[in-house]
Amino acid sequence: MELHALGLSEVYRQGKPAISFELFPPKTDGGMESLFEHLKELARCKPAFIPCTYGAGGSPRERTLEVLRSVRASHPHIPIGSHLTCVGSTRDDWRGYIRRAIAAGVDRIVALRGDPPQGETAFQPVEDGLSHAEELVRLLRASYPELGVIVAGYPETHPAAPSLAKDLEYLKRKVDAGADAVVTQLFYDNGDYFRFRDRCADAGITVPIVPGLLPVTNLAQIKRITGMCGAHLTQKLVRRLEVHGDDDEGQFSVGVYHAARQAEELIEQGAPGIHFYVLNKSRAAALICRALALFTPVE
């Protein structure tokens, strides 16, 4: 059956892992050209869908739609999705964006609160805006029931959450509001995912819990990323990366090996798919998909 014809939750219940690759909108035309060169490789892995992140304010959002229109034009068989945040927008702004996204072929939305704008420490909604992802999910369900809705989950707890219990409670509210699936924040210890999945089940969250992986290709870069999102690197992984010092290829090999081992164990233990944060590059994710035969490459 064509993936376009499936509801989002059914995509993760086909008896094989559903693979997705998350893009972000490049800032330059050169970046767009590079992205689509990498996308040729990712498309060979037959992804279940390709979402693109979303910026606050005018032009970044339009760049998201530009990316998604181009993905649809070059790979019409691949479903596409857009992130959507509560940052800097009114309800009318969202409705206008969603209508344009649907016209571009989007049928999946990743609903997020989003981070405060740069320079601000606390999230403040605009007038007639929304304060939480739960509200955004409800808006989507009420006005656009045909869209699949994904929300974020945090195996190591959201950095701003007062406690693990409160974080899980809020995730359940997002799911109860109408989310079809949960995609996790990146993590490097599979035990964090398995414990999170068990906590979700105990809390009555029954939608697919999809692990999100970001293969490490550079130690300094991943330290910055994990520092911002509250994830931690395992000591073993850090030691292996440090052995290679400034050897970029050595660090890349370690990161791919670690992520491939993660993905293999996750799938063996029943994960419904893998969501790759690819940072607009294909090499690491494509090598992992090939090594694990997650999808038969297109001839």
Image (cartoon, rainbow, N blue to C red):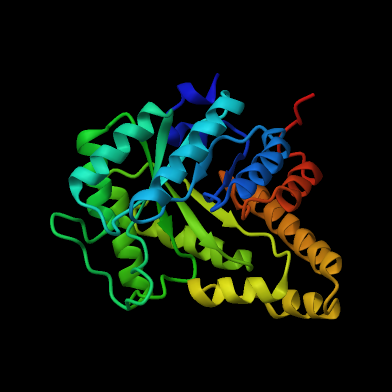
The outermost residue toward the front is 29
Place of residue 17 in the rendered image (x, y in percent of width and height, measured from the top left): 62, 39
Q: Quadrant of the C terminus?
A: top right
Choose between 144 and 236: the one closer to the eye: 144
Compared with 121, 76 (above or below) is above
Residue 123 sits in quarter: bottom left
Compared with 25, 222 (above or below) is below
The residue under the point 54% across, 32% down is: 70
Place of residue 18 in the rendered image (x, y in percent of width and height, measured from the top left): 59, 38
The outermost residue toward the top is 1
The residue under the point 53% across, 51% down is: 24
Q: How many marks?
A: 0
Is residue 20 visible in the rendered structure shown here?
yes
Is residue 207 visible in the rendered structure shown here?
no
Residue 191 sits in quarter: bottom right
Could you tell whether 290 is left or right of 45 in the image?
A: right
The residue under the point 54% across, 77% down is: 227
